[in-house]
């Protein structure tokens, strides 16, 4: 423990406030609670502490030791070494909120570049920087929709194929509002086409949310649904896997009003669950309704290019009653990492990574579908995740895979009871043909043992 004050300094401070000893500062606390004996082990040296923490960390298994086919919202991708090297620079790693933009030009420019890249990737006009993760980004879209309609529209229609945790987070956020309802996401409707959501959309609907690709990896054309949503005057929100947009049509080209998503796949490690990055992009007409930071490019009085924080006073500084949210800090370092990742890959590199994911996933799906007892659950096009119907429980299969050093897929039965014994596999550019073949061989063993 580091104590910055000398004994003489402590004595002088106590004398200045009129007490004799530090213990006298706690006289207002009942004696029986004042100085309890704590069951704390003896202190360790730095060397001993490092050794103990190292031993604890080795109890975990990660993608460094296991072959990973687990996705469901967080994915094992390759991150170029330059990403980590750059974000570890002191001016980025230790930087805090740029309250004084005139002395934070580097930080502001980095945020501006991130916004520009995400806007281009999603096909939208405005992007903020940023939210905590994809789930809270969707929830903030709900908050925005509520305020856009001034609380006069009370229904949120959400596809059952949106990530279950995202839907739970949206409900948590909306629970603080009067008469707000989330409809349409009954788990039994996962096999229906997106247009089936039209039955829930009416003149009281504020927002309709879908996922692209959806939670099961499927890729749908949402054009017909988008027309229905806008005919009813509601906002059309699309949850994306941003990496897939290196290959797929951006939501801005099929009528999305808001695009949200998890940015972890853009250069962020899995990190046992975070910190991650919430992407939020929208159209220019809604710019005054979005939460989070927005950096603009301008010129100073001498005509030199500069960057400023815009439309943030309502949340951090003044006019807080005008705020639609209370995002007072953000995942700035994560946004910077994703901006560096996208800049390093460029348009063609991002497409190459997306194509690798697509082709390797389809190779895996084809091989798994040929194993007796296993079958693909859906026939729709997919990106890099797909659902497999299994001959026995997913937990038993995953236990067997783990014995072979393979981290299996996501057990869908917990969130979708009708998909008991169904597993969601994810394949990325990190999975080699040999690893996919090893997965298939291990799955075949399970089938033979059954």
Image (cartoon, rainbow, N blue to C red):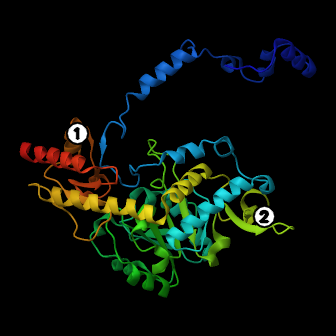
Q: Quadrant of residue 398?
A: top left
Q: What is the x, y in percent for residue 28?
A: 77, 24
Looking at the image, which is closer to me, 169 or 261? 261
Looking at the image, which is closer to me, 78 or 215? 78
Looking at the image, which is closer to me, 224 or 31? 224
Dot 1 alpha-carbon crowd within 10 angstroms: few under 14, some 14 to 19, many 20 or more? some
The quarter of the image holding the N terminus is top right
- Residue beneath disc 2: 319
Dot 2 alpha-carbon crowd within 10 angstroms: few under 14, some 14 to 19, many 20 or more? few
Say which mark, if any, is on residue 310: none
- Does the residue at mark 1 contact the one at mark 2 (Cβ under 8 Å)? no
Query: Could you tell me if residue 180 is visible in this image?
Result: no
Which residue is found at the position 41% from the left and 65% from the top? Answer: 351
Instruction: Report, in whole angstroms, how far the alpha carbon at label 1 lies from the one at label 2.
Output: 55 Å
Q: Is residue 396 left or right of residue 283?
A: left
Secondary structure beneath dot 1 equals helix
Secondary structure beneath dot 2 equals loop
Q: Is residue 142 left or right of residue 371?
A: right
Which residue is found at the position 58% from the left and 54% from the top? Answer: 335
100 lies above or below 25: below
Query: Could you tell me if residue 74 is visible in this image?
Result: yes
- Residue beneath disc 1: 399
Q: What is the x, y in percent for residue 266?
A: 48, 55
Which residue is found at the position 91% from the left and 16% from the top? Answer: 15
Q: Quadrant of residue 317?
A: bottom right
């Amino acid at each position: 423990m580091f104590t910055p004050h000398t004994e003489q300094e402590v004595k002088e401070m106590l004398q200045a406030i009129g007490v004799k000893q530090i213990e006298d500062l706690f006289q207002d606390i009942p004696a029986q609670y004042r100085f309890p004996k704590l069951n704390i082990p003896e202190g360790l040296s730095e060397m001993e502490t490092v050794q103990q923490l190292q031993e604890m960390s080795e109890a975990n298994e990660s993608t460094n030791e296991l072959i990973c086919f687990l996705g469901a919202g967080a994915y094992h991708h390759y991150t170029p070494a330059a990403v980590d090297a750059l974000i570890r620079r002191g001016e980025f790693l230790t930087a805090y909120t740029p309250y004084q933009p005139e002395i934070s030009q580097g930080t502001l420019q980095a945020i501006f570049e991130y916004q520009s890249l995400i806007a281009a990737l999603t096909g939208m006009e405005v992007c903020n920087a940023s939210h905590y993760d994809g789930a809270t980004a969707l929830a903030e879209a709900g908050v925005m929709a509520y305020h856009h309609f001034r609380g006069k529209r009370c229904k949120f229609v959400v596809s059952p194929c949106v990530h279950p945790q995202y839907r739970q987070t949206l409900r948590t956020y909306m629970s603080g509002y009067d008469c707000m309802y989330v409809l349409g996401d009954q788990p039994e409707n996962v096999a229906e086409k997106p247009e089936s959501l039209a039955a829930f959309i009416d003149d009281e609907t504020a927002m309709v949310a879908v996922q692209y690709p959806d939670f099961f990896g499927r890729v749908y054309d949402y054009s017909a649904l988008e027309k229905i949503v806008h005919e009813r005057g509601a906002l059309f929100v699309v949850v994306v896997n941003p990496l897939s947009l290196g290959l797929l049509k951006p939501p801005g080209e099929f009528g999305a009003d808001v695009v949200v998503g998890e940015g972890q796949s853009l250069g962020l490690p899995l990190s046992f669950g975070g910190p991650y990055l919430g992407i939020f992009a929208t159209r220019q007409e809604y710019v005054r309704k979005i939460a989070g930071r927005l950096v603009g490019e301008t010129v100073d009085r001498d005509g030199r290019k500069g960057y400023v924080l815009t439309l943030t006073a309502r949340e951090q500084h003044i006019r807080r009653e005008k705020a639609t949210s209370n995002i007072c800090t953000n995942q700035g370092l994560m946004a910077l990492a994703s901006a560096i990742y996208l800049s390093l890959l460029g348009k063609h590199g991002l497409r190459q990574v997306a194509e690798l994911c697509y082709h390797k996933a389809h190779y895996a799906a084809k091989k798994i579908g040929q194993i007796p007892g296993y079958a693909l659950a859906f026939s729709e096009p997919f990106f890099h995740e797909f659902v497999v119907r299994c001959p026995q429980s997913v937990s038993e299969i995953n236990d067997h895979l783990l014995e072979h050093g393979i981290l299996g897929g996501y057990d869908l039965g917990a969130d979708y009871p009708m998909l008991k014994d169904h597993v969601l596999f994810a394949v990325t550019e990190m999975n080699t043909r040999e690893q996919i073949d090893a997965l298939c061989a291990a799955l075949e063993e399970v089938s033979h043992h059954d």
